[in-house]
Structures are given as C-alpha cells and as structure tokens.
Image (cartoon, rainbow, N blue to C red):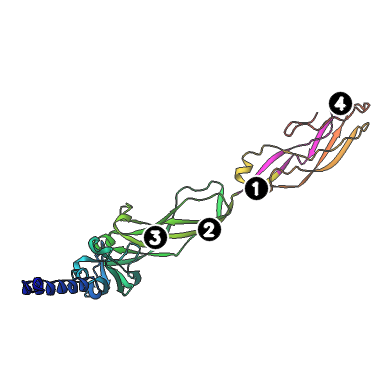
Amino acid sequence: MTLLRQNWHIKAGSLVSAVLLALFVRKQEDLVTRELNVPVKIEPRYGQRVADPAAGTSVRVRLEGPGNLVDDVQVDDLKIILNTTDTPPNRSTRVPVAVDLVEKYRNRVAVDWSPRAVLVKYVSDAAQEFSVEMRELSPARGWEYIENPVPSPARATVLGPRASVAQVRRIVAPFTRETEPRVEQMVTLHALDDRAQDISDQVQIEPAQVRITAIQQPVLGRKRVPVQPVFEVRAGSAPQITVTPRQVLATGAESTLERLYVVETVPFPVPPGESRVVRDVDLKSIAPDVRFEPTRVRVQLVYTRPRRAAQASPAPSPGVAAR
C-alpha cells in the first residue's frame, strides 16, 4: 500500500495519458467519410474548342476510410479521367467519368463519385460542306456501267482550323473498279486543295468513309468468224465441203471475242455409202455470254467416188478441219 502511495501523482498522470492516447488511436482508426468537388478539365483539340461541359463543372467525390488518411486527401490528389478520343465534333456525346486517387491512398481509401458520365461537345473553328466526287483509280477494261457509281452519303463536311478548311477545294472518293456486275466498296474520303494536293491530315472529314455502289456489264462486241464443220471421217475419202453461211456473226463480251477465231459445229455422223450428205447442224457454244447469228448452218459433203464405208473415226479435236 505504501508503494502505491509513492509518486502517486506521476502514476495518475501516466494513466490519464494512456487513456487519451488510446482514445486518439481509436478515433484515427474509425472509418469516416468526406466529400470533395473536383473540377472537370478537358483540353481543346486542334482546330476545335470545348463547348461542353461548361466552365466550372465538377465531379463530387466521396471518400471513405481512416480519418487520418481521409483528412489528408486534397483535390490535387484526385484526377478526373475522360476518354474523348472518339468524340465527334459538333455533337454532344455522353462520356463515362473515372476518378483516380494517388497511390499512397489508393488501397486504404474508398472512392465513389457522381455523376458517372458527362456530356462532352467539341465545336470546330470552321466547317464547310462539299459534294463527294468519284475518282476511278483503275478502269476495268471490257466493262461498262449500267448504273454509274454513287456515293452514300453524297456530301461530306470538312472541319478544323479556319485557315486549313479554307484551303479545301474538293472531297474525292478514290475507288478501284471491280470486274463484277455489282460494285460495292467502302472508301476513305480525301480533301484536296486547289493544286490537287491531299491535305486530309490538316482537317477532319465527316463522315470519314462513304459507300460506293454501281452496276455494270461487260462491253458487248460483234465479230464475224468462220465456221468449221466437225463430222465423222470416212477412211480414204476427202469430200468437198460447203458451209452455208461460211461465217456467222458472234455477239458477246469483247474480252471473249478477242480470243475467238473460229466456231465449230456440233459433231454429226456421216452415213456410209452416200456420195452427198446435207445436214443442218447447230453451232457449238463457247461461253454463256456469246451468241451466234444464225445459230445453225447447212453443211454439204460431196464425195467424188463412192467407196465402201470405213469404220467411223472419232471426231477431230476442236479447231482442226475434218478430213
């Protein structure tokens, strides 16, 4: 008992200090909440200014965590993140909002915010509308248009700094012509100045691409070609051959007619022992898009000396006169 009474005032002071310290530590470890208003900052783009959000717009951020940490967080420790890369000009676009907290608080302080998205609108310094012009890079030889190429949409808008937009004279859609009846392509638009130089890298074109559609057909040509009859051959006989008409008119794609030098008849048999054979025979088709006029010819075979019929031989190869 005597020991307890010794230096009692020092011992009482230590006890009070320990209690106060425990209360302080508990207070610091208790979860607290705090709200901060963080301003939204969006940088202007080349040739465009920010119309929305308006100056002074902010995001309300709610912090929750140990009191000693939450009280230390400042506005500069919070970063508002807006991805405006794909935001088109002159149009309001809803962009999601993200909030990043500096690393020293990130794992111990919870962050929530409102609103979760803001409307962003860039306005171009200048805008000018142009009709889209077609530019065929490589004509398809042997084809002609039934319906000429048409761009969709037919007009495009050039956006950007006033000086750059003022240099644009034409908007062109270059495309490669296909060798198919129906043409359909997505092509990128290009801005040209008065010297026909491409200055697309100095402006923005809306839309950036258009769809090109057209309908075409092969160019039709006409050509007279000789007729080659094809028939079974008698051994030891060489008939006199008469074809009426000798030539026929072929109509079809020019590319096909260029390779056509003779047209054959459908092979036909020759009865043995006859000295004169007359047949009306069809012409052999060479391609679905080529037609002949007339479609049949008359072939007359005259043998000068009747001979015993030999065994029929197979028809000769195409393009070789029968003997």
- Corner quadrant of residue 70: bottom left
Residue 244 painted magenta: yes
Three-letter amino acid code of the residue under disc 4: Ser
Q: CA distance from mark 3 to mark 2?
A: 20 Å
User: Type of residue at label 3?
Assistant: Ala
The region drawn magenta spans 220-248
Dot 4 or dot 1: first in sequence order is 4
- The residue beneath circle 4 is 237
From the image, state whether disc 3 or disc 1 is nearer to you: 3
Residue wearing tag 2: 214
Residue 206 coordinates in the image, percent (x, y): 37, 64
Look at label 1 and name its amino acid: Gly
Looking at marks 2 and 4 on the same chain, the residue that comes earlier in the sequence is marked by: 2
In the rendered image of this protein, does residue 85 appear above or below residue 232? below
Q: Position of residue 292 (x, y in %)?
A: 72, 46
Can residue 309 be seen here? The reply is yes
Q: Are marks 4 and 3 in contact (CB under 8 Å)?
A: no
Q: Quadrant of the C terminus?
A: top right
Mark 3, residue position: 208
Look at label 2 and name its amino acid. Answer: Ala
Residue 252: numbered disc: 1
